Image (cartoon, rainbow, N blue to C red):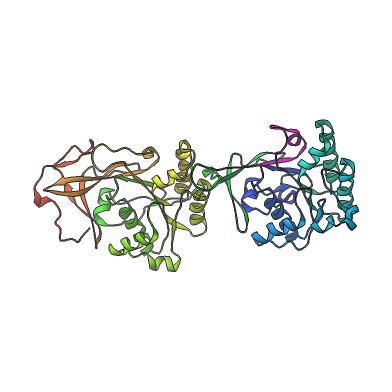
Amino acid sequence: MDNQQETDGDANLVGSGVPGLDHVLRGGFVRARAHLVEGRPGSGKTTIGLQFLIEGIKCGERCLYITLSESKRELYSVAARHGFDLAGIEIFELIPPELSLDPSKRQTLLHSSDLELGETVEMVLAEVERLKPDRVVFDSISEIRLLSQGILKYRRQVLALKSFFLLHDITVLLLDDLTGEQDDLNLHSVCHGVVRLEQRVPVYGGERRRLRVIKMRGVQIRGGYHDLVIRSGGVTVFPRLVAADHPIVEGGEYAKSNTELDALMNGGLDRGTTTLIMGPSGTGKSSVAISYLYSALERGEAGYLMVFDETLRVVKERSTGMGMPLEPFIRSGLLKLDQIDPAELTPGELASRIQDAVERQDAKVVVVDSLNGYLNAMPEEQYLVLQMHEIITYLNQKGVVTFLLLANHGVVGQMNSQVDLTYLSDTVVLLRYFEANGRIRRAVSVVKKRMGTHEDTIRELTLSSRGVVVGSALEEFSGVLSGIPKYHGTKSALMGTDIGDE
């Protein structure tokens, strides 16, 4: 192989075994180079190393795992938990098995802390010369740092190892558990690429892990932090969604939901637009969104409903009671319905689920119920708007009709929201309670529509076995913008109670 010239083409890249990481690296690690994967214990380094070698076996390459910190038994245990097959991977350990503590075999005992640096390195090089691997994982380079007992000696030894691997056209991952001095950048300057893994534990919920590619020479990587999870089956990386990376799909007019509701929109919604439905709890936000979703499903279009605040049973039973049964579409695969636990899922995985529904299921309607639950999934609340901006832009470019539900605090009076996303939305639908003739009723109005005109009237809204029922325009209102709408008209203008129980 000619190492004098590098290209960024696929032929010069090797897959990492983690599809999401390959996406971040724009294809994988650069071939025949030394790459550093660093992170505190438990961040996923060993698992990524195993997946890297398993990918090499699939490509017909010879693979070697050199371990100075874990035994072969421990590695096989990790692999078994993930369902990995390590057949074909050579494991060379400098920590002996437990049986080697037998006094009769004491001469074979090798502890990395007792070995001289030169002896350790010679044994590693001899094994590499014998096997002639294409891929190597070195776990961990921290042991070399401890044996070196000095920065200068350590740096020279790492450079020597790098030159050796480069000479033999080997792609190597050096794993570092960051047990040395803080901000030690010696390896960063030596290695061709650097991937850092991080983890933290929020006050409530499961741990959050993420990675960042600090550098990759000659490759325009996808920068920033990307969420990752470690589950049965290995490490999964969720690349940060960048709307600009996705092509724009032509929009078009979106089919109507029901006559009265569409009249408020002056004919309905356009494809590639986002509708924000706001109102206090119980005003019918979910029902209005599901009425549009149900109409799309009846036309044979796929949809995705992401539920944060309710159980799937409640959503399905309520929809069925309103004449919009979802179960047949779930069984047919046309509707994907997800119940989200914000304490366990990372924001990156949530965005990835939306992207998968659009690109794999070809979903034309996406409902996020609700943004309040989505906000709780964000450990850094100030970044919700930035991430939501990317998601909305992506969905709009894909020609998807998106519904975002946002619950206001309180029931009556001036109501506030956790976050303001009205400026990102193409259409804003406002739901409110009002009192008339001794009853609490619901009112619906459209306060914004970017693409075209809309009615500026207020209509009564009722939820019944017929679905979402919208009455005629009610003109005798006051105090709508104050948060306490008051109706001064006659009782005959209001909808009766014979349309069904709420």
Measured as percent of width and height from the top left, residue 115 is found at: 86, 44
Q: Is residue 63 above or below residue 244?
A: below
Q: Which region is colored magenta?
A: 176-199
Task: Specify the quadrant that holds the C terminus.
Answer: bottom left
Pick the residue in front: 151 or 360.
151
Q: Residue at x 84, y 42 (%)?
A: 161
Query: Horizontal placement of 196 versus 484: left or right?
Result: right
- 317 vs 458, left or right, is right
Residue 297's quadrant in the figure? bottom left
Residue 446, image quadrant: top left
Residue at screen point 15% across, 61% down: 498
**On the rendered structure, is 341 left or right of 120?**
left
**Which residue is more in the foreground, 38 or 1?**
38
Which residue is at the front of the view, 433 or 76?
Answer: 76
Q: Is residue 238 visible?
A: no
Residue 197, position as x, y percentages in the image: 64, 43
Q: Residue at x 42, y 49 (%)?
A: 272
Could one spot residue 5 in this view of the protein? yes
Give coordinates of residue 139: x percent, y percent. Answer: 76, 47
Residue 184 is a magenta residue: yes
Query: Foreground residue, 494 or 299?
Result: 494
